[in-house]
Image (spheres, rainbow, N blue to C red):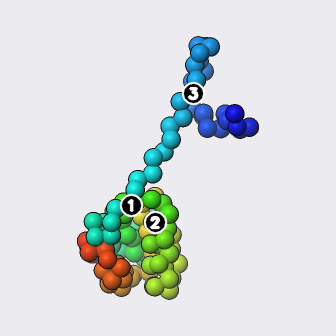
Amino acid sequence: MKKNEWKERLGVIYSTNPDYTFQYQDEIEETTLPKEKQALRVTLDKRNRGGKTVTLITGFRGTNEDLANLGKLLKIKCGVGGTAKDGEIIIQGDFRQKIIEILTKEGYTKAIKN
């Protein structure tokens, strides 16, 4: 058993059953869809960002590693900062048109500008 096994069982109610074994829920990471089947939405967002404008790319279906790689590519091509987490990519500034062009060149045919 692991040294800090209790950390993975937070929220489990105590059991008096001597035969009880905790069932770990393994998070199954979704496989990445092919580029031509990805339905990405590119939008402009200003909410909860202190008045700053960001370009938000949502709808990515796949692994976190592939999401991070796409986010890195877009940040490099646009020459700005950003982040990729929780199934969305945030690029600082208004780069909707440029991101649509980059995505279509990379093979994402279903990129939609909102």
In the drawing, does residue 74 fall left or right of residue 15?
left
Name the amino acid, label 2: Asp
Answer whether residue 50 is visible to the viewer in this image: no
Is label 2 in a helix, a strand or a loop? helix
User: In the image, which disc is placed on residue 22?
Assistant: 3
Name the amino acid, label 3: Phe
Residue lying furthest top in this view?
A: 17
- x and y, in percent, of residue 41 in the image: 30, 69
User: In the image, which disc is placed on residue 66?
Assistant: 2
**Snapshot quadrant of residue 21:** top right
Is label 3 in a helix, a strand or a loop? loop
Q: How many badges with numbers are in the image?
A: 3
Residue at x-position 74% and y-position 37%: 3
Pointer 1 residue: 32
Q: Nearer the viewer, mark 3 or mark 1?
A: 1
User: In the image, which disc is placed on residue 98?
Assistant: none
Quick one: 34 or 39, which is closer to the camera? 34
Dot 3, how many residues are within 10 Å of its Cα: few (below 14), some (14-19), or many (20+)? few
Quick one: 68 or 47, which is closer to the camera? 68
* Marks 3/1: CA–CA distance: 30 Å
Residue at x-position 45% and y-position 51%: 29
